[in-house]
Image (tube, helix red, strand yellow):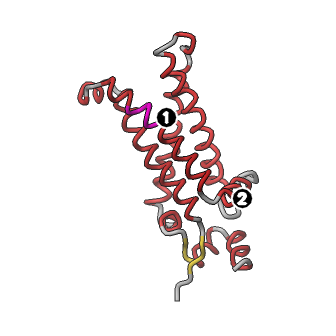
């Protein structure tokens, strides 16, 4: 009989999927603005700019709504797990990815607001804001490609997708990939 162990709470999964869907939307609208061939093909640049800006505001707002109205205690425990760069419920790569994703979110918001307000008031226009926003996009795209490869393609880690969709993973898989967390999880059941 296959046994499963709870890996992610409903709040953690909701936060992940809100982040994923909104980021992909922003990536699509951002690439339309960034790549001249896409901008010409799509046209309506002012509309795409508005969609991108309000998509960013929606992204951060939804993340805050999930964090405020979801299991805050659970999210705080998860955040504390990220403070130690050793393997437990998450491996070091997952922890670095989560930390960078959170930092990028803040930097995307700050640089996006500066770009938006800079078009309306020159006091908010800084030469390096576009470079920061574009550089973040390339770095975040690299993280996304690595994340998708490990979650969808790499055979050893593909089962982790079940944890992010249904919340649980096979106990034998958890023992193999996260032995310290698996041992603690078995003791607390």
Secondary structure beneath dot 2 equals helix
Residue at far front of view: 69
Residue numbers of the magenta segment: 51-56
Q: Residues within 10 Å of mark 2 (few under 14, many from 20)?
A: few
Could you tell me which quadrant the C terminus lies in? bottom right
Vertical placement of 112 versus 163: above or below? above
Please identify the residue farthest to the top as the structure is shown. Answer: 122
Disc 2: which residue: 77
Q: Which mark is residue 138?
A: 1
Occupied quadrant, residue 39:
top left
Most distant residue in the bottom direction: 1
- Residue 131: image location, x then y, percent: 52, 22
Percent across and percent down for residue 180 are: 72, 69
Label 1 crowd bin: few (<14), some (14–19), many (20+), radius 10 Å: few
Toward the viewer: 86 or 82?
A: 82
Rendered residue at 60%/48% (across/down): 97
Query: Which residue is depicted at the point 43% across and 49% down?
Result: 21
Is 52 part of what is drawn in magenta? yes
Which dot, 1 or 2, sits closer to the camera?
2
> In 3D space, how far apart are the residues under numbered discs 1 and 2 (Cα atoms)?
30 Å
Foreground of the two, 119 or 168: 119
């Amino acid at each position: 009989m296959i046994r499963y162990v709870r890996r992610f709470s409903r709040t953690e999964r909701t936060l992940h999927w809100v982040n994923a869907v909104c980021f992909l939307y922003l990536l699509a609208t951002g690439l339309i603005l960034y790549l001249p061939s896409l901008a010409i093909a799509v046209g309506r640049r002012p509309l795409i700019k508005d969609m991108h800006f309000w998509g960013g505001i929606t992204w951060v707002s939804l993340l805050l709504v999930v964090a405020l109205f979801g299991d805050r205690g659970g999210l705080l425990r998860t955040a504390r797990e990220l403070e130690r760069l050793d393997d437990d419920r998450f491996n070091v790569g997952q922890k670095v990815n989560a930390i960078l994703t959170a930092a990028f979110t803040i930097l995307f918001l700050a640089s996006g607001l500066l770009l938006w307000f800079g078009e309306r008031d020159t006091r908010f226009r800084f030469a390096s804001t576009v470079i920061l926003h574009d550089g973040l996009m390339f770095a975040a795209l690299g993280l996304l490609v690595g994340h998708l490869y490990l979650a969808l393609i790499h055979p050893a880690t593909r089962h982790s997708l079940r944890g992010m969709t249904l919340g649980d993973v096979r106990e034998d898989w958890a023992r193999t990939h996260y032995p310290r967390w698996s041992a603690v999880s078995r003791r607390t059941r």
